[in-house]
Image (cartoon, helix red, strand yellow):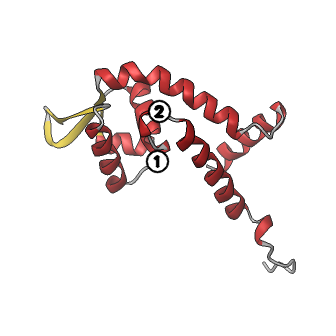
Amino acid sequence: MTNDRPYVLDDQIGYLMRLATQRHTSIFQDRMDEGLTPTQFSLMTRLAEVGPSSQNHLGRLAALDVATVKGVVDRLAAKGLVVVAPDPSDGRLRIVSLSSRGAALLPQLQARGHEITEETMKPLTARERETIVRLLRKLA
């Protein structure tokens, strides 16, 4: 299939998604407590949803590759927000769980997450917000 239309960068989905991600990341960094990155916050939220999980399973749940999830988990552990222990039935696996500090902080962090989402979506109407979330789920 050929396309005779000129390639205009400002009209390309990948470029626009990158710009939106940069804006969201900037808002996130300005507002999130504990110096968390969006990926660290996502892992903590997934842990709260599913409970203690193997590092590999947690990575799959958060759409992260093995190398990335290990680094994120290690940084969260260094902040005292998660605990990592060997799996008692398979010592090759690492089980990750929220620490008591991480579990206690999570409601506050998630409240910040709502504020961040609100600020990110501020230029959109309520209907546009629903539409963009629905369309992004479809693309993901």
User: Where residue 49 sits: x, y (%)?
Assistant: 44, 26
Q: Which residue is mark 1?
A: 63
In the structure shown, which secondary structural element does the residue marked by tag 2 occupy?
A: helix
Q: Which residue is mark 2?
A: 33
User: Where residue 66 sits: x, y (%)?
Assistant: 33, 53
- Residue at image position (49%, 22%) is 108
Q: Is residue 93 left or right of residue 8?
A: left
In the structure shown, which secondary structural element does the residue marked by tag 1 occupy?
A: loop
Q: Is residue 119 left or right of residue 57?
A: right
Going by the picture, which residue comes out furthest to the front? 30
Q: Quadrant of residue 112?
A: top right
User: Where residue 113 sits: x, y (%)?
Assistant: 56, 31
Going by the picture, which residue comes out furthest to the right? 5
- Residue at image position (24%, 35%) is 95
- 94 or 124: nearer the viewer: 124
Pick whichever of labels 1 and 2 is earlier in the sequence: 2
Q: Is residue 123 left or right of residue 20?
A: right
- 22 or 73: nearer the viewer: 22
- Residue at image position (56%, 24%) is 111
User: Where residue 38 sits: x, y (%)?
Assistant: 50, 43
- Residue at image position (68%, 52%) is 20
For the residue carrying disc 2, how many other residues have a C-alpha within 10 Å: few (<14), some (14-19), or many (20+)? some
Q: Of the residues shown, which amino acid type is indicated by label 1?
A: Ala
